[in-house]
Amino acid sequence: MPVLVVGSIALDTVKTPFEEHADLLGGSASYCAVAASFFSAVNLVGVVGADFPAEHVAFFKSRGMDLAGLQVAEGRTFRWSGEYMLDMNVRETRSIALNVFEHFTPRLAAGYAESAFVLLGNIGPGLQNHVLDQMAGPRFVIADTMDLWIKVALDELMRLLGRVDMLILNDSEARLLTRETSLVKAGLLIQAMGPRFVAIKKGEHGCLLFGEGGDFFSCSAYPLEDVHDPTGAGDTFAGGLAGYLASTVSGEVTFGDLRKAVVHGSVLASFNVEMFSLERMRSLTQEDIAERYESFRLFSHFEVIP
Ligand code: AMP
């Protein structure tokens, strides 16, 4: 079952306390789509400029993605630059150049409207709503967002929340959206805004998953010794989660499905931060994923497993 993924496709410049790299493959849709492709087919919707390197398109193709929804527009690709502090949970955006993204209207290629699973990666909620307007009754819709949209496009975001099954956001965004300090209260308040399921990410500290009727799951992050570039960890988490659901769930998505999906998303994200950009995804194998999932299972369990 394919996942329709929409979001930004970018060339990023990333600075950490130890390294700086320019013009890397990035963008919410790139991370979401590549992560999802480890589990399911992907229909990609996005825009790049004429300067977008052919090698990145070849990489998407090598992951088996359907690229009929990838527009190539006149002009330059969206660019983003960010800098991480010594505490890599803290990041500052240094610059953004919208470029071809400024006039982007997501268009669904033939057959995309019937996709059962939809992942609305981080882009303006107006564009996310526009994608949903074109869909023919998807089974499960997941949306990601960021602080910028909570600040500048709250009405569109609230309209979106009434139409999605699940919202994924980070802790500071959850607090900004609800004006609540407690993340548990924030999760419940966001559910009251529309989505049946909410995942609140806490960077290197894992995530909280809220379901219906008080269902709750706390997932730690995989403890890594070295994080080289946290960029796209959240998008990779969302993509892994969506791809896992699309590949395993044929009926209604249950809370049990989502618990496993959240762990698969966390596993994918833990690999992605080991190298800059999407580099780690190039060599990642199904065996790597299965092995890390198993060690995740063992160290998360609080009873002795024989
Ligand atoms: P994350 O680390 O999960 O927040 O995602 C980082 C990615 O988001 C980078 O690769 C950026 O290119 C992309 N990004 C940053 N700002 C925006 C924005 N305003 N709209 C869409 N994508 C963005």
Image (spheres, helix red, strand yellow):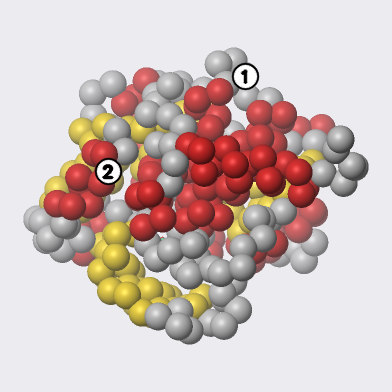
**Camera-nearest residue between 32 and 174:** 32
Q: Nearer the viewer, mark 2 or mark 1?
A: 2
Q: Answer with mark 2 or mark 1, whichever residue precedes in sequence.
A: 2
Secondary structure at numbered mark 2 = helix
Is 212 displayed left or right of 237 in the figure? Answer: right
To which residue does mark 1 refer?
252
Badge 1 local density, few (<14 within 10 Å), some, or many (20+)? few
Question: Residue 269's mark?
Answer: none
Local secondary structure at mark 1: loop
**Residue 165 seen anywhere in this rendered image of the structure:** yes
- Residue located at (43% from left, 46% from top): 284
Image coordinates for residue 37, horizontal then vertical, percent: 40, 37
Residue picked out by circle 2: 60
What is the three-letter code of the residue carrying label 1? Glu
Figure quadrant of the N terminus:
top left
- The answer to whether 277 is drawn above or below residue 18 in the figure is above
Residue type pointed to by label 2: Phe
